Amino acid sequence: MKQVTVAGAGKIGSAIAELLHHGGYKVTLLDCHADYLKSLKLPEGIVRRTADIAQGLDPALLAGQFAVLSALPFHLTRTVAKAAAVADVHYLDLTEDVASTKDVRALAEGASTAFIPQCGLAPGFVSIAAHDLAGHFDEVDTIRLRVGALPRFPSNALGYNLTWSTEGLINEYIEPCEAIVNGRRALVPALDGMETLGVDGVIYEAFNTSGGLGSLCETYEGRVRELNYRTMRYPGHRDIMKVLLSDLRLSERRHILQDIFTYAIPGTSQDLVVLSVIVTGTRHGRQHQETLARTIQAQDFMGGYRTAIQLTTAGSICAVLDLLAEGKIPTSGFVRQEDIPLDAYLANRYGQVYQQEG
């Protein structure tokens, strides 16, 4: 039984802890709020420990652990990764933040353990899927990643409910977005690149957001003409966000926008995740396209009801941990999502959540 620590007991962190417990891991769950930790309805075998990671994480808390998994806001990523480096344990996280990932990569240099950031949905599974599809071509022209975490029953002008980190959501709407444009690596503005697309008869809009590509730009620089990531939302969402962030200048006062969202936008457990990974290029001298599409809804999985975002995010990092424990991916240094084989991932007990096709 491998011992692991999960840092952060929010909706995703607590789901990670529960899934790993059901999967046979011995789990310690860390959070700064003792009363909140105590209130969580989790299996008794999960150890709950209070730790204010914003003030630092004592590496001694990780002694004897196989790995630490960070489900904390992106600005705490380096704190957990640094403690993992000192404690000599494997490190995994869910961050979409580009700067945080660069910090993790620096800590991974020369490490005897694995540092695997961006193990969620996007970046994460879509990065693995895109790299696998690209391997089916003699020459790749374009790679397009489209992902939406959405309510099944939208009931406000934004067409949105809170299903994951509000802080992370706002961050990806503001920070510059990596892309490859006309064969060159570039930064493009968030909320630009507006397009309309349909999946399973539903019309969505999609636009640039930060962080969804992970390390794909580095991997495919000089190898493709176009590579981009766009978030899918119900029509009208992007225009309202433009008003809030640009016209009202709330991009300069993120804490106010976060407070407004937390107060005014309800969460939901009736959600879905829609994703589409489209790769075009040449095969045997002819133009060809391959698409991997999924529509995943909330459902019962491993001992409890899981929202779609819990399934796809918590399930993803648990799958990567399993593959690490089984020696099916590199076990030292910086590990990219592209280093994870798609077939092994989908065959994993946690990765099976992505087997549902749209």
Image (cartoon, rainbow, N blue to C red):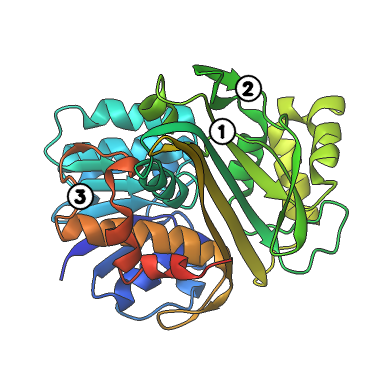
Residue 189 lies, with reference to residue 233, above or below; the image says above
Q: Residues within 10 Å of mark 2 (few under 14, many from 20)?
A: some
Q: CA distance from mark 3 to mark 2?
A: 32 Å
Residue 47 lies, with reference to residue 326, above or below; the image says below
Comparing labels 1 and 3, the label whose residue is closer to the camera:
1
First in residue order: circle 3 vs circle 2: 2
Mark 2 is on which residue type?
Answer: Val
- Nearer-the-camera pick, 47 or 69: 69
* Residue 334 falls in image quadrant: top left
First in residue order: circle 1 vs circle 2: 2
Indicate left or right for 114 with 263 as reference: left
- Nearer-the-camera pick, 58 or 264: 264
Q: Is residue 213 visible?
A: yes
Q: CA distance from mark 1 to mark 3?
A: 26 Å
Residue that badge 2 annotates: 188
Residue that badge 3 annotates: 329
Mark 1 is on which residue type?
Answer: Asn
Q: Is residue 9 visible?
A: no
Residue 346 position, x and y percent, is 35, 64
Helix, strand or loop status at disc 2: strand
Residue at the spot 42% in from the left edge and 83% down from the top edge: 303
Residue that badge 1 annotates: 228
* Residue 45 falls in image quadrant: bottom left
Helix, strand or loop status at disc 3: loop
Residue 167 lies, with reference to residue 109, above or below; the image says below
Residue at the spot 20% in from the left edge and 27% down from the top edge: 109
The quadrant the C terminus occupies is: bottom right
Q: Do the numbered discs 1 and 3 sit on residues whose CB atoms are within 8 Å?
A: no
Residue 138 position, x and y percent, is 36, 35
Mark 3 is on which residue type?
Answer: Ile
Q: Which numbered disc covers residue 303? A: none
Q: Residues within 10 Å of mark 3 (few under 14, many from 20)?
A: many
